[in-house]
Amino acid sequence: MAGERQERPLRRPHLPDLHIRLRSELGRIDEQLRAMQSSMDRLQGLLDAVLAISREVELPRVLHRIVTAAMDLVGARYGALGVLDASGERLEQFISAGLSDEERTALAQAGLPRGRGVLGHLIRYPDPLRIDDIQGHPASAGFPPGHPRLTTLLGVAITVRGEIYGDLYLSERLDGQPFDVHDENVVAALAGAAGIAIENVRLFERIRVGAEQFQRLLLPTLPDLRPFTAAAIYRPAAEPSQLGGDWYDAIPLPDHVVAAVIGDVVGHDLQAAAAMAATRNMLRALVFDQRGPPGAILAQLDRTLETITNNRVTTTTLARIEPEGPGWRLCWSTAGHVPPLLVTRDRHVVYLLGEPGLPLGVDTGQPRPDHSRPLPPEATVVFFTDGLIEHPAHPIDESLSELAGLAAVHAGLPLPEFVQALADHHPSDGHDDMAILALRTPPV
């Protein structure tokens, strides 16, 4: 009709075009999901790295963990951490990772980096540094002989209490790409957590040193025990701020008799250390005063502690080495303690097993068995606490066997070096303090 508007039919989208747009939109959504998943994975990796660093309680392990964690986060082939000296201008320590044995050997002659080139640039200007071509950077000074040729670098400063502690360096992404802003951000976040971890470990170390010094003040200096030789060693627990209750003692008595004591008060605190000191002094007085067998002396000690102290449970071994004809005899009694170890001159090793008594502080009415056996010339008797052998991942029998093998290997050493070897290569996890006392009979 004239004047009336004629409606035109709607055009339907061309089906192939719709498919293209839909595919494009789905691709964009997929990319966003992948990016989100990558961000979540990276965040989880950062959290895992921070937790791994915070678990370490020794500074060298913390520093090495920082380097390897940063390498894992960004997929770097090489990593290093340069620790600055007191002046803040030079490196006093350089922890590296990713180098092959051949590369380390080749660089051994070069010594510590001198803080020149791009490493020195980050020392002077501690802002995050990202370089796509090291050789083309204005601060580049080349590489020493034997150094792997590097192209890319990501550097981030680590601060502790507002001062630059050192610089974290990463180089060569495994995928061949240069480091990007996401790498920089995640490594900067790790560096912040690393600074806190370093400060915590340094604080723990100060506490540990103080606790160890206090503990050592409670332990005796071994007297002259001739004709026997003797050596002792104490190692604090790896956990900071934990005082221990381990102690040892060796006492020369009349008639060429020597008394040896090893003990462990339950607990890791100031009260345990105080109880250890009181128990050691009481036992020393009883050993001087009484000439009875070790079991009788331990029984008297148990009754005394029950009467005059708020005594803690304590394990201990008291032994006497006495002349017998041309040789010697060992007499001992054990109050819930690990058995002594006997190592002969020809490296035969045996644990001195016998019926153990109850630990001190459990039941004073129970008998305390005594045991004895002859000692050959140049035999070594090793008394130790359970911190030397306890490991949560290993059965106690396995640790005892490992310690016996270790004693056999080092049996020919002079006694101070012998106890040092046992303390250095012990089968425990190091999370408890340990004490070792060794006595060696004279030659024929």
Image (cartoon, rainbow, N blue to C red):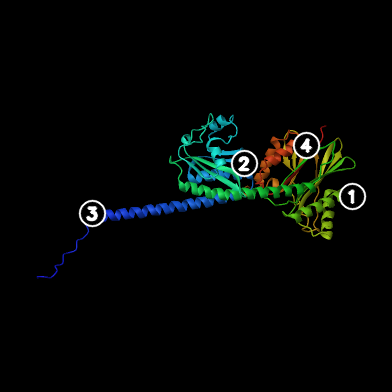
Q: Position of residue 11 (x, y in %)?
A: 19, 61
The quadrant the C terminus occupies is top right
> Residue 88 — which label?
2
Mark 1, residue position:
289
Foreground mark, 1 or 2, reads: 2
Q: Position of residue 221 (x, y in %)?
A: 81, 43
Distance (Cα) linking label 2 and label 3 = 66 Å
Distance (Cα) linking label 1 and label 4 = 28 Å
For the residue pair 39 and 121, the one nearer the viewer reads as: 121
Mark 3, residue position:
16
The quadrant the N terminus occupies is bottom left
Q: Amino acid at mark 3?
A: Pro
Q: Does label 1 or label 4 sit earlier along the sequence?
A: 1
Secondary element at image label 4 = loop
For the residue pair 145 and 138, the one nearer the viewer reads as: 138
The 10 Å Cα crowd at callout 1, few under 14, some 14 to 19, many 20 or more, is: few
Q: Does label 4 or label 3 sit earlier along the sequence?
A: 3
Instruction: Classify residue 139 as left or right of residue 223.
Output: left
For the residue pair 385 and 324, the one nearer the viewer reads as: 385
Q: Amino acid at mark 1?
A: Asp
Which residue ends up furthest to the left in the rendered image? 2
> Residue 225 — which label?
none
Foreground mark, 2 or 4, reads: 2
Secondary element at image label 3 = helix
